[in-house]
Structures are given as structure tokens and as C-alpha cells.
């Protein structure tokens, strides 16, 4: 290479570097799309909107939540996967991001391990083990004693195959070496109604909105899937107290991700804006009212968590022979 060509190449490289640095410095320079793979009004959507509002003020550009519901959140996930890695199309996702590819393989249309850049896990939504208020099953010990008496002696409801409640119950069953009967429904609401009526023995239900059913004596809490007892149900033991440590990590997470290879400076800016929101008293109050446990971890911590999350559900799905619900 001649000296002249070397000088020209060096100049071009420096200009490119300066341009990239400038782009990172001015990010964001236009509105940011935040895709949610669920319908408006659900916990993931509500939390995304609370954070988007505060992040808009911090970033100086609108963070606009777009609901792309359908295909177990895969429509939104695929769109972000195929978007430019510039920080202007982001994903606010949950447990299904890892679970769908385990159940569907390449049909999911993305690889959760390589196609995204984790930014931060905003919060987790704890799960609670409930039975009808007048059920003879008063503790996890009662439940497992009956379940071990014969295969499928105990039934559990869920919002559908492969959902968080289904997988958490399968984890309990495999950990306890018991075979339970899964009864899937089209959503948590119909499933809980069947539990309250006593037609299904129990279910593992998200904490959001559960307190009213406990207060009106329609359900009884057998245990909570949190590291510490919940203030809403102080008499209910944790799953660890019931003999199943680490169960709190089964709680569905809600977190922020970008496409693979999103620039580190952009990731840092987004992480800063999100964690700044999560420490504000008014934001914390809104999320805690939903029953969310705030996390706000680093990109590296979120990456490590997602790896553990994938491995855990991969093991549970294979052990319980869970199949995708394609209806």
C-alpha cells in the first residue's frame, strides 16, 4: 500500500469513527418505537407505558409504545429482530421470548440467544399458588401428598399451554416427582373461575389483581413464588419455606431489548433512562401497585439472567414433554 493510499484510508476510517461517535452522542434524534407483543391493558403493556412516559422526558424524544399482539408475542419479536440496530426500534418482552423457540424451534423465526441485545430487566411479576377458598388443599404439602397418591390425582389450570402458569406448575410437578393433570384454558380469567368453582384443584396465578379474590374469600393462597413473603398475603409461606428454593426465578419477567449489535453507547443511554425511571417514587408506586417486583439490572446481568431462564424452561419443557398450543 502506498503512503498516499494509507493516508486516504486512515482519513476515511477517522471520519467514519467520528460520524459513529457523533451519532451516538446525539442519540436519540427522533422518536423511538417500543414494541409490545401483547394487547393493550395487560401487565407487560401497562409497565411498558409507565416506563415509556418517563423515558420520553429523560431522552428528549418520544418513546412510543406499539402493540403488536399475536402468535404468542412472536410478531413483535420478529419485527425487532429484523430492524436496524440503531436504537429506534426496541422490544419490551417477557417469558415467551425464550419459551417460543424451545417449543417451536426454527418456526419461531428468531434465536433468543443471538438475535437481541439485552438492555435491562425492568421487573418480575411473581406467581402465587392458589386453590378454591373451601378446598381441602391448604398447603403445598397437602397438594403434593394428594398428587403423589396416584398419577393425575391433582389437576391444575393455566391460561394455555406453554404459558407462565403452566410451566411453573410443571416445574413444581417435576421437582416433586409427581404427575399432575394440566387443564388449559383461553386465559387466566377463565382458568381462575374453574379453580374457584372447585372443578380444578389449583393453579399458579400472577399476583396482579389476586388480592380482591383473596379478600372476598374466593381463593386461598397456598404459597407465594417470591424470595420473601408478600405484604398482601403475610400468612402465605414462600415456595422456599415449602421446600422449593429458587422458585422466585420462575416469575415472568418484563424487560427491554434491542436488535443484535445495538451500539454500546446507545445501550448505555437507554439503560440509564430506564433505570432512572425505576428509582423514581411515583414510578415505583405504579409498578408495585400492579404487584411487580422491580429489578432494573445491568445489560450484563440481564444477559446472564436470560441464559439461565432459557436453560431452566428448556429443561422443564423437555422433562414434562410440553407441546406448543398452535390453536
Image (spheres, helix red, strand yellow):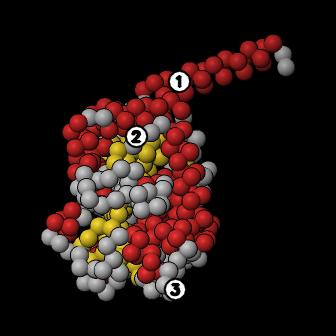
Sequence order check, earlier mark of 3 and 1: 1
Residue 8 image point, x, y percent: 72, 18
Give the number of the disc on residue 21: 1
Question: Which class describes the residues within 10 Å of circle 1: few (<14), some (14-19), or many (20+)?
Answer: few
| Mark 3–mark 2 distance (CA, rounded to whole Å) | 41 Å
| Mark 3–mark 1 distance (CA, rounded to whole Å) | 62 Å
Let me know if residue 193 appears in the view: no
Camera-nearest label, 2 or 1: 2
Q: Say whether marks 3 and 2 touch (CB < 8 Å).
A: no
Residue lying furthest left in this view? 216
Let me know if residue 264 appears in the view: yes
Residue lying furthest right in this view? 1
Camera-nearest label, 3 or 1: 3
Helix, strand or loop under label 1: helix
The answer to whether 216 is drawn above or below residue 89 in the figure is: below
Sequence order check, earlier mark of 3 and 2: 3
Residue ID for mark 2: 296
Q: Quadrant of residue 218?
A: bottom left
Residue 46 image point, x, y percent: 28, 54
Helix, strand or loop under label 2: loop
Question: Which class describes the residues within 10 Å of circle 3: few (<14), some (14-19), or many (20+)?
Answer: few
Residue 185 image point, x, y percent: 37, 80
Q: Residue at x 81, y 12 (%)?
A: 3
Q: Residue 272 or 229: which is nearer the viewer?
A: 229
The answer to whether 117 is drawn above or below residue 43 in the figure is: above
Residue ID for mark 3: 151
Q: Residue at x 54, y 35 (%)?
A: 263
Residue 202 image point, x, y percent: 35, 76
| Mark 2–mark 1 distance (CA, rounded to whole Å) | 26 Å
Amino acid at each position: 500500500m502506498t503512503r498516499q493510499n494509507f493516508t486516504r484510508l486512515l482519513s476515511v476510517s477517522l471520519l467514519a469513527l467520528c460520524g459513529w461517535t457523533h451519532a451516538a452522542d446525539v442519540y436519540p434524534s427522533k422518536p423511538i418505537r417500543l414494541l409490545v407483543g401483547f394487547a393493550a391493558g395487560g401487565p407487560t403493556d401497562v409497565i411498558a407505558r409507565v416506563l415509556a412516559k418517563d423515558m420520553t422526558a429523560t431522552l428528549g424524544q418520544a418513546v412510543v409504545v406499539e402493540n403488536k399482539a399475536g402468535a404468542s408475542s412472536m410478531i413483535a419479536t420478529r419485527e425487532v429482530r429484523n430492524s436496524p440496530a440503531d436504537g429506534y426500534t426496541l422490544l419490551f418482552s417477557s417469558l415467551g421470548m425464550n419459551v417460543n423457540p424451545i417449543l417451536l424451534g426454527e418456526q419461531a423465526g428468531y434465536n433468543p440467544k443471538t438475535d437481541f441485545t439485552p438492555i435491562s430487566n425492568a421487573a418480575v411479576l411473581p406467581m402465587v399458588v392458589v386453590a378454591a377458598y373451601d378446598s381441602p388443599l391448604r398447603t403445598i404439602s397437602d397438594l403434593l401428598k394428594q398428587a403423589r397418591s396416584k398419577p393425575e390425582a391433582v389437576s391444575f389450570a393455566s391460561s394455555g399451554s406453554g404459558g407462565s402458569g403452566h410451566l411453573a406448575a410443571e416445574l413444581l410437578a417435576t421437582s416433586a416427582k409427581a404427575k399432575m393433570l394440566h387443564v388449559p384454558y383461553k386465559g387466566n380469567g377463565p382458568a381462575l373461575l374453574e379453580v374457584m368453582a372447585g372443578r380444578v384443584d389449583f393453579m399458579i396465578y400472577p399476583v396482579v389483581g389476586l388480592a380482591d379474590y383473596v379478600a372476598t374469600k374466593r381463593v386461598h393462597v397456598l404459597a407465594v413464588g417470591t424470595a420473601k413473603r408478600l405484604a398482601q398475603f403475610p400468612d402465605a409461606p414462600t415456595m422456599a419455606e415449602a421446600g422449593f428454593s429458587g422458585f422466585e426465578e420462575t416469575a415472568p419477567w418484563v424487560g427491554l431489548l434491542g436488535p443484535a449489535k445495538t451500539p454500546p453507547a446507545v445501550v448505555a443511554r437507554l439503560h440509564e433512562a430506564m433505570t432512572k425511571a425505576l428509582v423514581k417514587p411515583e414510578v415505583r408506586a405504579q409498578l408495585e401497585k400492579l404487584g411487580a417486583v422491580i429489578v432494573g439490572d445491568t445489560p450484563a446481568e440481564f444477559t446472564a439472567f436470560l441464559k439461565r431462564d432459557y436453560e431452566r424452561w428448556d429443561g422443564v419443557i423437555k422433562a414434562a414433554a410440553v407441546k406448543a398450543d398452535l390453536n
